[in-house]
Image (spheres, coloured by chain):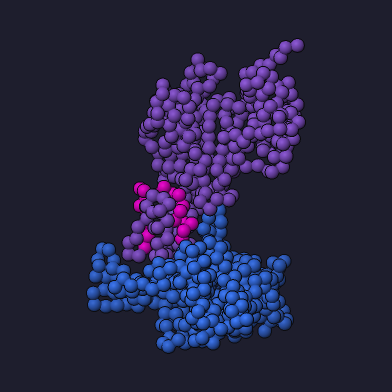
Amino acid sequence: MGMDINTKKLKKNAFRVSKERGIGASRIRVPGGYLDAKILGMVQEIAETYGNGYVHLTTRQGFEIEGIHLEDMEQINQKLQPIIEMLEINQTDPNTGYPASGTRNISACIGNNVCPFANYNTAKLAKRIEKEVFPNDLHFKIACTGCSNDCAKVRMHDFGIIGMTLPQYDPGRCVNCQACVKGCKSLSVNALRVENYKIVRDEEKCIGCGVCITKCPTRALTRSKKKYYKLTIMGRSGKKNPRLGEDFLVWADEDNIVKIICNTYRFVEKYISPSAPARKEHVGYIIDRVGFEEYKKWALEGVELLPETIVKECVYWSGIHFD
Amino acid sequence: MGYQFTKAEAERMFEKWGSQYDVFAPKLMEGEGCFSDTDVVRYGKVTSLDEIVWDRKSDYSLKEVLLAINETLFYFTEDKTTVPEGPQKDILIFLRSCDLCAVQRLDEIYLKNGYEDFYYARVRKRVKFILMGCKTSCASGFCVSMGTNQARQYDAYVKVDNTQKVVYADIKDKVLKAFVEGGKEIEVTPDYVTENVEKVNLPKNLSNKSFENTIWQEYGDRCIGCGRCNFACPTCTCFTMQDIFYKENAKVGERRRVWASCQVDGYTDMAGGHSYRKTQGERLRFKVMHKIYDFEKRFGYPMCVGCGRCDDICPEYISFSNCVNRLTKEEAEHEK
């Protein structure tokens, strides 16, 4: 009996067709790249039972179990069930694996669970966004990074979320040691200066990275109670016009960012090219085609931004053109 | 006199103290730690016993209540100077044994070391101390080694029982005692620790040779000169002066004194641009020697009270207690 497999369905089920006939790979999404170490054992078991014993750590912080036989997909889906449940992935029917693969795993840097520079819990936000947007067949890449260092390379994503904090300054605790000034100059954007022995922050320059706060030895500089984010949009790699994402919102809040991402899915549903193969037209190219003004209208629908949020009136992207 | 109060009785007494005194105690400053989603415990005004952090040592000491980080000494206009008013209310400070011993060091420097310091004295005269006991040792402290584990010069001792229902107090001060209502008279002795995890032996016969010890170079290479050890220390008393000429009218301004750190650049700068102790190693040596040797030579007891805050706060994991023990060990080896 010949092998009769719907490869379109297979791909949406988060499997991959490989170079070798009859052999594929199983992809496991791990929002925020954050997981209970027990899952590693489960992945190992699947890899050793159904695969060739090897696992690829994907560029998007998932696992790809190599060398699986395509006829084992149903059994593998059963084995994936506890992983899917432990990672709280939205699912339609239990034991049927992942319901979609178009919207990719939401990746994140290690964030403030560990990193002294991070301005928020990146894994937590990645999970929240995953809950909002998955499952969806539309091709979206979203990533969260803790600070402007952008270790998660979020500017290569359709949506990049960069943590910010608004430095709170108590001059009464400041001893003019200038650790913040030196730190900002050497590690960040040189936005601080001294006037009359006290610190003056250039609000235009400051990127809210929080370096000054980590350098302050007396807690004269502390973090804002509110967590702020920069939202960069429509970065991408690829064959036609790879480019870095540009700032859309600065000093934005989490709720509105989630709202804007969800709005963008509706925008894509409306404007995606009917001739796009497997409905795979990248959102950035749709905006290029439709125009930023129209996108902005859709993106900001029902969004009430904080008074301090800066919205870029227009966004221009550069990058290399091969098309 | 010792008392056992219900929590409600104790809170009522606390409230009455609050009407008479500004009460300062270790307080949790949420989200104000160095890193995202971390807190800091430091001194602030409190209005109830629940606001006080009882279960861990404050990251910064009580020092800032007695000795403001920034203190305006006087304002000047073209022909006049005005000294700002001191505190308007008496002050109660909740503190642990090590910190109460630190107050003795602060007094030594600011009250007994020649002239009495006007600004320190006017605050200090208004202060009463309420001891918080230590049932168990903190991880980094070495108060037993320094003999600061049991302070007796308190005005009152207050302990909130683990159940949060009972409060024990030993109130020695007459004024504070006058606020007592209800409660049961019992014997109360402050909790104190008799052993720490960290034990420190001070060197006894340091000579100028110790200047050449390679550990200064070693720690100096690691030290980033941030001054956290000094700012967190309850016994560091150094300040520097700042003359501020207001931007809108430079004929008017103020003179401030501001905490200074012997580890931070600029501390030993002098007119003409000369500066001694240029390297972090030299600065570290100076600090360590002052805490465990030089101060003692002059006043008869070591400056360090073994609270361990400098170890806890150092971002480069330089351990003062380990450094001192290494010095002592090397000294012993040399003497063999």
Tally of marks: 0
**Residue placed most toward the observer, B30 or B270:** B270
Rendered colour, chain A: purple
> Residue B24, how many percent across, how many down?
54, 71
Residue A183 appearing in the image: yes
Residue interval drawn in magenta: A198-218
**Residue placed most toward the observer, B309 or A70:** A70
> Residue A175, how many percent across, how many down?
41, 67
Point 54% across, 79% down: residue? B292
- In the image, residue B321 lies in the stretch drawn in magenta: no
Q: Is residue A271 above or below residue A263?
A: above
In the image, farthest residue toward the top: A1
Point 53% across, 29% down: residue? A140
Q: Quadrant of residue B58?
A: bottom right
> Residue A296, how many percent across, how many down?
42, 31
Q: Is residue A322 above or below residue B245?
A: above
A197 with respect to B60 (left or right): left
Image quarter hosting the N terminus of chain B: bottom right
Image quarter hosting the C terminus of chain B: bottom right
> Residue A27, how many percent across, how many down?
64, 30
Rendered colour, chain B: blue
Point 65% across, 78% down: residue? B144
Point 57% across, 71% down: residue? B323
Residue A255 appearing in the image: no
- In the image, residue A211 lies in the stretch drawn in magenta: yes
